[in-house]
Image (cartoon, helix red, strand yellow):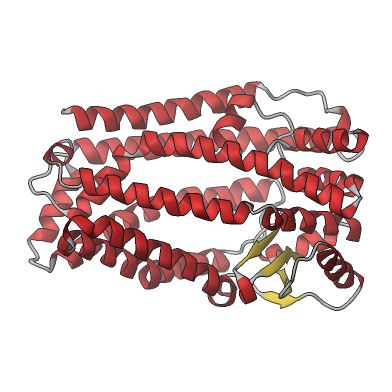
Amino acid sequence: MNIYGIIILSALLSDYLLNLYADILNLKNLKPELPEEFRDVFDKQEYAKSQHYTKVKTKFGIFTSTFNLVLILIFWFSGGFNFLDNILRSWNLHPILTGLLYIGILILIKTILSIPFSVYSTFVIEEKFDFNKTTPKVFIADLMKGFALALIIGAPLLAGVLAFFRYAGNMAWVYCWIITVFFTILLQYIAPRWILPLFNKFEPLEDGELKERIFKYANSVEYKLSGIFVMNGSKRSTKSNAFFTGFGKNRRVVLFDTLIEKHTIPEMITILAHEIGHYKKKHILQSMLISIVHTGVLFYLLSIFISHKGLFDAFYMDHMSIYCGLIFFGMLYTPVELILSILMNILSRKNEYTADRFAAETTNDPMSMIKALKKLSVDNLVNLLPHKVYVFLNYSHPPILKRIRSLKHSVNT
């Protein structure tokens, strides 16, 4: 095994062991005592249920990640990457078509092998904790729609990347960067109208007090709303959420029907105020710019390593190719991606506190924000006491308890 193989193997094992360590710490950090802040919304039985849910999900996650790691290592060291490449090369197809088939087959194999885990998670774990509303018909339909979107959107983009690296010479990474950013921005425009409705029903929020209060608040902070929609989230789960999607005239506020059912109007306003806070504080723009820069750096590094023979030797390849280089570089990039994800989570948690403060200040109703967070924690069986190492590695949002304490502090200062 050469230096590339050692780096990639070390990265895969380190990533697995680090997350395993964080999972174990997180499980050990579970405590039977209910935090004082939640005694008005959690009873002992519900709190015990939330901890049991964390244990079950964590143990299942450990099993799934172990399976995936073993699968990758077996496929790698048995020469699976080279075996598949030689079969496709024997068909004498155009290199770009060969690349599409190669990557597509690997994704298909991984997807098929992941289906039993998805089925168990949805129809056993989520069902056990009264979350699941997905029917087998909806589950299968989601899979088919996902495959169709991958072919319609993913395949052309991948073909473009392969073509640029094959024909565009030293400027290939720049062209790939431009086309990927273009696709990403385009999706932000078309997703609200064409993609999301393939999976859920979106209906305009009915006229009434909630709609009036939302528009009144949006006007007070000079935020122009183009539409408020209710999504049938109850089609798949009893969990609640709200989000913003799209840009410009396609920008929409989306409320889960389960959220409307479980929260008062003042609580709903603070939840939306939090989301608007992300826009007003430029967090969305910030994330987009970081993503654009990250994509450019990624393609630049890819252009450097994609033709290194040692990278292909590490996977026992008989031939060098752009499509295999994409996959192998992705694995080589693992430690960098881990560091970047940690840094992005740190920034995201900071932004969440800022959005919380924006909501509290502009609604002048921090207590409704606190009540909303408490209800969400109960409805979604949130782990109230995650370990700080687990939070550091995985949380894009601060733990609910810290958000509540931060909001209370803002009230008292």
Q: Residue 336 is drawn in which quadrant?
A: top left
Displayed quadrant of residue 17: top left
The answer to whether residue 43 of the structure is visible from this angle is no
Quadrant, the C terminus: top right
Q: Is residue 119 left or right of residue 275?
A: left
Q: Is residue 298 above or below residue 5?
A: below
Q: Where is residue 407 in the image (x, y as percent from the top left)?
A: 83, 38
Asked whether, in this view, residue 63 is left or right of residue 391, the answer is left
Identity of the residue drawn at 56% across and 36% down: 394
In the foreground, 342 or 170 = 170
Total labels drawn: 0
Q: Where is residue 205 in the image (x, y as percent from the top left)?
A: 79, 74
- Let me know if residue 145 appears in the view: yes
Q: 32 left or right of 138?
A: right
Q: Please name whichever residue, 297 or 213, is drawn nearer the observer in this view of the structure.
A: 297
**Residue at position x 23%, y 58% from top?**
171
The front one of 255 and 412 is 412
Is residue 264 or residue 189 the one in the foreground?
A: 189
Q: Quadrant of the N terminus?
A: top left
Q: Which residue is drawn at 42% across and 30% down?
A: 16
Percent across and percent down for residue 75 are 25, 41
| 28 horizontally vs 155: left or right | right
Residue 126 placement (x, y as % from top left): 64, 49
